Image (cartoon, helix red, strand yellow):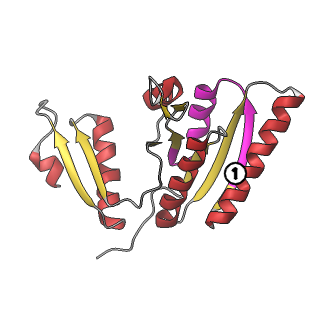
Amino acid sequence: PYPQQHIFPDILVTITGAESGWLALSQAAEIARRESSTLHGFHVAKSDSDEDHRHTMALLEEFAFRCESLGAEYTTSWTVGDPAREIIERARWNDLVVINQRRMHGRLAESPLGTIFQVVAEQSARPILAVPGTAVHVPERAVLAFDGSPKAQEALFVFRHILTCWNVRGLVITVDTGRSSRVTLEG
C-alpha cells in the first residue's frame, strides 16, 4: 500500500493545572506516540501579576516534567487574556487541540465540557479532543457522527486516517439529511 502519514504533527495541549488537565496531557502523549507529534503546552494566565506569573511558571515546569517522564517532545508557551480566544488563535498553528473535561469536587461539572470548550469547538478550525474519564486509554475504537456537512467531511478524513494508521475499529453513525450518502462514506 502507501506509506503511513501523520496528520497531527503539532498538538496543542491546554494547561490548567487541574488533575483532569494532566490526564488530558497523558492522553495527548498517547496520540503523539502514534503520530510522531510535538506537544505544545499552552497556558492562559488571568493577569500578568507576580503571583499569576509564578503560578504560570510552575505550571509550565510541571508540564515539561510530565512530558519528559512520558518521553514526549514538547514546547511550552503562555499568554494573558481570554482563554477561549487565545486557544482559538493558537490552534491555527497546530493540527489538534486537546482540552480536559472539567471536574468539580471530584465529579463532572454541570456543563462537563465547559464554556471554553464550547466556544473553541464552535470557532476553531482544528479538530478538538475533549478528554473525559479518569484514565488514559489506548485508542481501540473510533465513532464518527456523520451528517454530510463540510465539517463532517473533514471529520471523515480524520476518521479514515485513525482507522488506517492507528489500527482501530470504527463505527459511523449517520442520519439521512440529504447531504450524506453511502457513496461518500464508502469512498
Left or right: 125 in relation to 78: left
Residue at which label 1 appears: 63
Q: Position of residue 127 (x, y in %)?
A: 44, 43
Considering depth in this image, is 184 or 68 the residue closer to the camera? Answer: 68
Depicted 166 relative to depicted 134: above or below:
below
Depicted 92 relative to depicted 120: above or below:
below
Tell me which amino acid carries mark 1.
Phe
Residue 103 lies within the magenta run: no
Q: Position of residue 177 (x, y in %)?
A: 14, 30
Left or right: 41 in relation to 96: right
Considering depth in this image, is 103 or 59 the residue closer to the camera? Answer: 103
Q: Which element type, helix, strand or loop, lies under badge 1?
A: helix
* Residue 144 at least partly seen: yes
- Residue at point 49% right, 55% down? 8
Q: Quadrant of residue 133?
A: top left
Left or right: 151 in relation to 11: left
Left or right: 162 in relation to 110: left
- Residue at point 50% right, 54% down? 27
Q: Which residues are magenta?
A: 75-97
Q: Position of residue 45 (x, y in %)?
A: 74, 30
Considering depth in this image, is 151 or 169 the residue closer to the camera? Answer: 169
- Give the position of the C terminus as an image quadrant: bottom left
* Residue 92 at least partly seen: no
Q: Quadrant of residue 147?
A: top left
Residue 85 lies within the magenta run: yes
Depicted 185 relative to depicted 101: above or below:
below
- Residue at point 51% right, 49% down? 95
- Give the position of the N terminus as an image quadrant: bottom left
- Residue at point 49% right, 30% down? 117
Q: Quadrant of residue 87?
A: top right
